[in-house]
Every structure is written in C-alpha cells, then in structure tokens.
C-alpha cells in the first residue's frame, strides 16, 4: 500500500503541470457472487460512489487514473416462497489505479480503462424484510477473518468532455472477503467526474 502511494505521488510530480483532477460521483449496482468471479447472483444492490479523480498523463492518448473513493457494495436477494428480500450493504474505501487509453488523438472522445483496486472494508448492515416488514436487522460482521482488505480488478468504457468525464466500469474482487462465504464482490459503476480547469501560465498578453 505504501509503495503504491509513493509510486502515484512520483507520477503526479512528473506531470503536475497537466494533471487533470476533480470530484467523482456515481451509482454502484452490486452483488455478491454465489461462487466464482463473474457469477452474478440476485438483484442489483444500488449504492453511492463518492471520491476524487486524478488523471496523470503519460502520452497523448494514454494516462493513469488514481481515484480514491468511498463505494457501496453488497447484495440484494429475494426468496419468492417466503416473500422476503435480504439486503446486505458493505461500505468500502477504495484506491483504484487504472490505465486509461483514448481511442482517438483528439483531446475529447471515447476511452477504455483497466487496472486494479485496493479496498478497505469499513462497515456494513444486513436487513431482511417480508411483505415490507423488517424481520431481521443488524450490523454486518466479517465471518471467519479479521482481514478488511480486498483486491479487485476492473475494466471500463467512457466518454471525455472538456470539463467532465462519464464512465461505465465493471469490477470484481479477486480475494474473498470471508473465509466462510466464498463469493466475490461484483460492481457495475456509473461514474461522473467534474474536471477542474487546468492552471494556465501568465503570458503578459490578454485576449
């Protein structure tokens, strides 16, 4: 973790003049797989995404994205026979580090992203309802482990605008968050980033 932060800090120093940065918000649609990396289970569990994006340029069409954020994961499952819905919310602090490549040499346009995320589980809550009535509610606790970290990988597709960025990102954990429940956290994220204006150097001439 420390080495990753030092690496990102070094990259930012080498490209500080062209660093694009701004707040990032979005909606997560999550589930906990029944087993396996891509096995979607149940209904999508919506939740918030809030963070900050740093885009560190590398070439004209390639850059690195470093995006510390809070993300809601979890699951929403239904039992039709018992008429119950069970909602599990898992709050994570995440540090995605992704490679971004533009599909065109023009400043704005479509792009692809891919990379890894280091997550830290903060808290959670489980609720079971039947016909709208709460049958069970409690704080969620990790089962069989005290390790709060989780590693994920993700891919994305998006659209750059002069002052904003839209992205659809899919990510899945590759380390289990429980030694008892062997599922993985799957998340489809709808992201929006507002890009702050680039700093301009004074030239002594005004338009």
Image (spheres, helix red, strand yellow):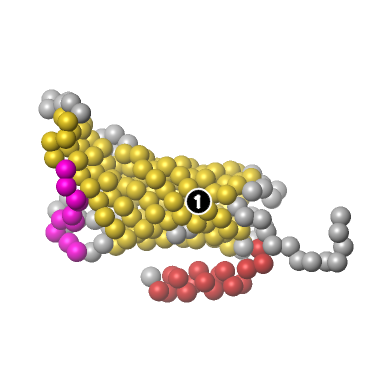
Q: How far across and down, in percent of the image, does residue 38 sit?
A: 32, 43
Residue appearing at x 31%, y 52% in the figure = 91
Pointer 1: what residue?
24
Residue nearer the viewer, 200 or 15? 200
Label 1 sits on a secondary structure element that is: strand
Judging depth in this view, the residue of 74 and 171 nearest the camera is: 74
Q: Position of residue 169 (x, y in %)?
A: 45, 45
Q: Is residue 138 magenta?
A: yes
Residue drawn at (60%, 52%), measured in percent from left and top? 195
Q: Quadrant location of the N terminus? A: bottom left
User: In the rendered view, does 75 fall on the left or right side of 191?
Assistant: left
The image position of residue 84, as x and y in percent, is 17, 30
**Is 59 on the left or on the right of 8, as rendered?**
right
Q: Residue at x 18, y 54 (%)?
A: 141
Quadrant of the rendered image containing residue 44: top left
Res 70 visible = yes
Q: Which residues are magenta?
A: 137-146
**Location of the C terminus (image quadrant):** bottom right
Q: Is residue 27 above or below residue 93?
A: above
Q: Position of residue 35 (x, y in %)?
A: 22, 45
Helix, strand or loop for the magenta stretch, by majority: loop
**Which residue occupies the foreground of this view, 50 or 155?**
50
- Residue at the spot 29% in from the left edge and 42% down from the top edge: 31
Relative to residue 105, is residue 22 drawn left or right? Answer: left
Residue farthest toward the front in the current orientation of the protein: 133
Query: In the rendered image, which quarter is residue 174 located in?
Result: bottom left
Q: Is residue 116 visible?
A: no
């Amino acid at each position: 973790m420390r080495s990753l932060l030092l690496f990102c800090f070094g990259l930012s120093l080498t490209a500080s003049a062209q660093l694009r940065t701004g707040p990032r918000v979005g909606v997560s649609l999550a589930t906990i797989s029944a087993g396996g990396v891509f096995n979607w289970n149940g209904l999508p569990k919506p939740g918030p995404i809030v963070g900050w994006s740093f885009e560190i340029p590398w070439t004209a069409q390639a850059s690195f994205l470093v995006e510390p954020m809070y993300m809601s994961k979890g699951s929403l499952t239904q039992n039709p026979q018992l008429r119950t819905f069970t909602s599990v919310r898992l709050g994570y602090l995440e540090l995605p580090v992704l490679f971004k490549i533009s599909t065109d040499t023009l400043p704005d346009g479509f792009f692809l992203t891919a990379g890894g995320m280091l997550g830290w589980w903060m808290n959670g809550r489980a609720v079971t309802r039947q016909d709208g009535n709460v049958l069970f509610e409690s704080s969620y606790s990790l089962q069989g482990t005290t390790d709060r970290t989780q590693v994920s990988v993700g891919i994305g597709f998006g659209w750059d605008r002069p002052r904003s960025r839209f992205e659809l990102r899919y990510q899945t954990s590759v380390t289990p968050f429980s030694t008892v429940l062997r599922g993985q956290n799957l998340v489809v994220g709808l992201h929006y980033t507002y890009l702050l204006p680039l700093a301009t150097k004074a030239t002594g001439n005004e338009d």
